């Protein structure tokens, strides 16, 4: 069974940085596109960054030029470098492998809380 374990969240001041990590067990990730999602209180989960099998990346407009997604297939890890954080980035962050239309391949992990506040 595939497990996703996100880590690296915390409390950070506006303008600060965090690096999130996602450890995948039970499956190789080399055959999947991978993505980071976030869910703020009272809002739907949204995809914020995606990295394809070949390494191409795409981002939600709200995080473009501030967030960077990367992957290490050998270590089965996915990362999200978040810079210039804003209060509106506050959410629980999750990783998963996106399905072509919507949804995700694997069961969701517990996520990691990111809180941006002064």
Image (spheres, grey):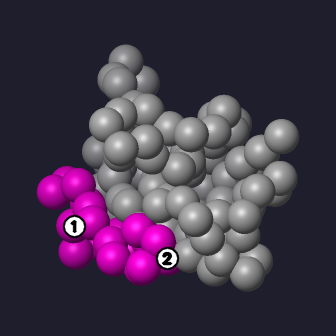
Establish if 94 lies above or below 49.
Answer: above
Q: Is residue 40 left or right of residue 2?
A: left
Residue neighbourhood size for the residue with mark 1, other residues' Cα within 10 Å, grouped as few (<14), some (14–19), many (≥20):
few
Q: Is residue 84 left or right of residue 16?
A: left
Establish if 56 lies above or below 93.
Answer: below
* First to last magenta residue range: 52-70
Q: Name the residue at 26% across, 62% down.
A: 59
In the rendered image, the quadrant that contains the N terminus is top right
Is residue 114 at all visible to an observer of this figure?
no
Disc 2: which residue? 70
Disc 1: which residue? 64
Majority SS type along the magenta span: loop
Is residue 48 at all visible to an observer of this figure?
yes
- Number of marks present in the image shown: 2
Q: Residue furthest front?
A: 31
Q: Which mark is residue 13?
A: none
Q: Quadrant of residue 82?
A: bottom left
Q: Quadrant of residue 101?
A: top left
Establish if 115 lies above or below 79.
Answer: above
In-front residue for pair 17/58 = 58
- The alpha-carbon separation of the residues under discs 1 and 2 comes to 14 Å
């Amino acid at each position: 069974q595939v497990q996703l374990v996100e880590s690296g969240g915390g409390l950070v001041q506006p303008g600060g940085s965090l690096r999130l990590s996602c450890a995948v067990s039970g499956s190789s990730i080399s055959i999947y596109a991978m993505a980071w999602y976030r869910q703020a209180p009272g809002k739907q989960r949204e995809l914020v960054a995606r990295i394809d099998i070949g390494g191409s990346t795409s981002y939600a407009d709200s995080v473009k030029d501030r967030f960077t997604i990367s992957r290490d297939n050998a270590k089965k890890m996915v990362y999200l470098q978040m810079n210039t954080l804003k209060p509106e980035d506050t959410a629980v962050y999750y990783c998963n492998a996106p399905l072509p239309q919507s949804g995700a391949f694997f069961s969701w992990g517990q996520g990691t809380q990111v809180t941006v506040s002064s």
